[in-house]
Amino acid sequence: MVEWVYRRAVQSDLFEKVIVATDDTRILQVVSDFGGEAELTPTDLPSGTDRVAFIARKTDADIYVNLQGDEPLISPDLLGMVCTPYSDPEVVMTTAIKRIASLKELTDPNLVRVVIDKRGDALYFTRAAIPYYRDEPDHQKWINQHAYFKHIGIYTYRRDFLLLLSGLPQGNLEGVEKLEQLRVLENGYRIRTVITEYDSISVDTPEDLLYVENFIKLNKLKVNGI
């Protein structure tokens, strides 16, 4: 799975370098075996953001992209899209979201929902279905009457902000929801979202893995080298 993610990332011509940041020597070996670049990070880092920041302290770049290793169907085009908001000098961090189209997605606790303001900045991330339609008990009508969005687990940061973020303590909301991006919002910073039609499946369960494997077979998907 990590090889699929890596090879999809290198298909984008946007990046100068793609590095797998891991605290597991087994993953380090796997990446080395298929010819990728990986670096070992400390085992006590609490999140992917902290692992990317560890790499950022040793490298020099303007923008860093944090791509989760469990998203084998991530689109190389999407990786470019989430970097476009940096034409606005006020943007320090971005992420991707996609409109929810089904009741299953709206109610699945493994999917993270997000609400945004008129500018596209995230107001909150949660595993709950928000906003809550107080006067409408039919959840299907919620989707028809309002644009609900799910979060796609990819982040980008300006270097200075990434290093600042990794030094901030974990907040109460982050601890409760187990969503590292809430650390940003709790400390008063903004995350600019990019709405996309590209979808990505985070492999969180054995059922997710089986679904992705079947999806790849049915659609005859390939990446370079696989």
Image (spheres, helix red, strand yellow):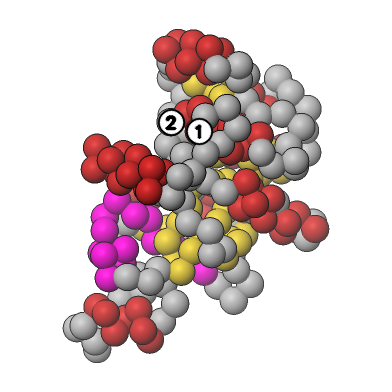
The single residue placed furthest to the left in the displayed view is 137
Q: Position of residue 136 (x, y in %)?
A: 24, 87
33 and 69: which one is in front? 33
State the separation of the CA atoms marked 2 and 1: 5 Å
Q: Position of residue 205 (x, y in %)?
A: 26, 40
Which picture quadrant has residue 150? bottom left
**Which residue is rendered at x = 43% and y = 50% of the image?**
219
Magenta-drawn segment = 103-116
Which picture quadrant has residue 40? top right
Q: Residues within 10 Å of mark 2 (few under 14, many from 20)?
A: some
Answer left or right for 199 relative to 223.
left
Which picture quadrant has residue 86? bottom right
97 and 171: which one is in front? 97
Q: Answer yes or no: do the residues labelled 2 and 1 have beta carbons within 8 Å?
A: yes
The quadrant the N terminus occupies is top left
Q: Residues within 10 Å of mark 1 (few under 14, many from 20)?
A: some
In the rendered image, the vertical position of residue 167 relative to residue 207, given as above or below: above
- For disc 1, the marked residue is 4
**Which residue is rendered at x = 57% and y = 49% of the image?**
75
Q: Which kind of residue does numbered mark 1 sit on?
A: Trp
In the rendered image, the vertical position of residue 148 relative to residue 11, given as above or below: below
In the rendered image, the vertical position of residue 127 relative to residue 47, given as above or below: below
Is residue 160 in view?
no
Assign a secondary structure to mark 2.
loop
Q: Position of residue 27 (x, y in %)?
A: 45, 17
Q: Position of residue 199 (x, y in %)?
A: 48, 56
Assign a secondary structure to mark 1.
helix
**Which residue is rendered at x = 73% and y = 56% of the image?**
84
Q: Which kind of residue does numbered mark 2 sit on?
A: Met
Res 1 label? 2
